[in-house]
């Protein structure tokens, strides 16, 4: 199971979206400001990160 699969499973289990996002930011060094070069180099990470972010309830 890949690291991204673990985060996907956590999302599916209903774990706190904020906790998942914080953990992903730390593990994958996701920049606070949108960085197109990072996004291209880490497209799989950013795809899941956006999925997690878009699942938030406001």
Image (cartoon, helix red, strand yellow):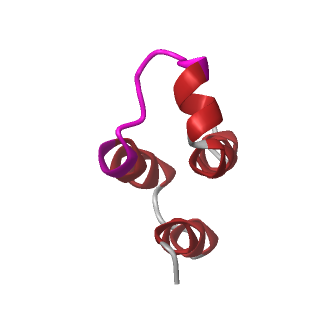
> Please, what is the dominant secondary structure of the magenta stretch?
loop
* Residue 58 rendering spot, x and y as whole percentages: 62, 34
* Residue 52 rendering spot, x and y as whole percentages: 61, 50
Judge left or right: residue 32 versus residue 17. left
Front residue of 30/19: it is 30
* Residue in the picture at 33% in, 51% down: 27
* Residue in the picture at 61% in, 41% down: 53
Q: Is residue 25 above or below residue 10?
A: above
* Residue in the picture at 44% in, 55% down: 20
Q: Does the magenta stretch include residue 9?
A: no
Q: Which residue lies furthest to the bottom in this view?
A: 1
Q: Is residue 29 magenta?
A: yes
* Residue 1 rendering spot, x and y as whole percentages: 52, 84
User: Looking at the image, how many numbered discs can be counted on the residues?
Assistant: 0
* Residue in the picture at 68% in, 46% down: 47
- Residue interval drawn in magenta: 26-36
* Residue 49 rendering spot, x and y as whole percentages: 58, 45
């Amino acid at each position: 199971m890949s690291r991204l699969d673990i985060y996907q499973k956590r999302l599916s289990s209903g774990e706190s979206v904020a906790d998942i996002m914080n953990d992903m930011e730390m593990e994958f060094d996701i920049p606070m400001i949108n960085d197109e070069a990072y996004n291209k180099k880490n497209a799989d990470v950013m795809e899941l990160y956006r999925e997690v972010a878009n699942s938030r309830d406001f």
